[in-house]
Amino acid sequence: MMVPEDFHSFLNHYLKSWRSFSIEEIKKCISNEYQAREADGHSEIIDFGYQESVEGWEQAFSQLRDHAEWIINEIGILPLKNNEVMVILSATLLMDEQPLDKASLFFQTFKKDENECWKLIMSYIEAGVPKDHLNSLVMVDKES
């Protein structure tokens, strides 16, 4: 199964919105039915939905926009179903031009809605991953 052609332009828009701290554009990319789970690296698991997600983005963007830069790397793109795609990303920050030593690993599922627009519907986030561990990530390609 191939990744739908229009997905790549949507993903580029989503990542550009994230990198530019654009809360209005990020909100357009998230489904109202969005569900997420975040593991914070200290054995705490947090489940949240659309409203908590938007509030988190707003808080992070307002605190960081003047002295930080997002470093977001695409690790993989996996078509799941017709019009449903998972993207694996790592994200960290440059704070006052200094890189953080930890990152978050995002498994994000996007789906076309009833208006044929791509929306983020689900995320699993592993926060606080040492960046040097991400360098050890190996994608295994096995045939059944």
Image (tube, rainbow, N blue to C red):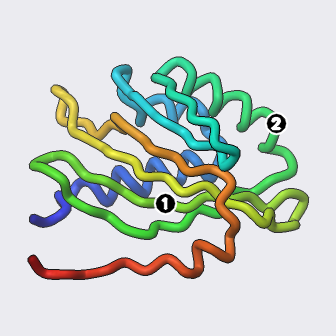
Instruction: Name which residue lies at 18% across and 53% down.
Output: 80
Q: Residues within 10 Å of mark 1 (few under 14, many from 20)?
A: some
Q: Amino acid at mark 1?
A: Leu
Q: Amino acid at mark 2?
A: Gln
Q: Secondary structure at mark 1?
A: strand
User: Which of 112 and 80 lies nearest the eye of the viewer?
Assistant: 80
* 66 lies left or right of 3: right
In the rendered image, which quarter contains the N terminus? Answer: bottom left
Residue 3's tag is: none
Q: Secondary structure at mark 2?
A: helix
Residue 106 position (above or below residue 98): above
> Of all residues shown, which one is farthest toward the right?
96
Looking at marks 1 and 2 on the same chain, the residue that comes earlier in the sequence is marked by 2
* 30 lies left or right of 143: right
**Displayed quadrant of residue 63:** top right
User: Which of 63 and 52 lies nearest the eye of the viewer?
Assistant: 52
> Of all residues shown, which one is farthest toward the front?
43
Marks 1/2: CA–CA distance: 22 Å
Residue 39 position (above or below residue 128): above
* 140 lies left or right of 6: right
Instruction: Name which residue lies at 61% across and 55% down.
Output: 104
- Between marks 1 and 2 in the image, the one whose residue lies nearer the viewer: 1
Residue 89 position (above or below residue 112): below
The residue where tag 2 is placed is 63
Instruction: Name which residue lies at 62% across and 53% down.
Output: 19
Q: Residues within 10 Å of mark 2 (few under 14, many from 20)?
A: few
Instruction: Name which residue lies at 63% across and 33% down.
Output: 57
In the rendered image, which quarter contains the C terminus? Answer: bottom left
Question: Residue 43: x percent and y percent?
Answer: 64, 42
The residue where tag 1 is placed is 89
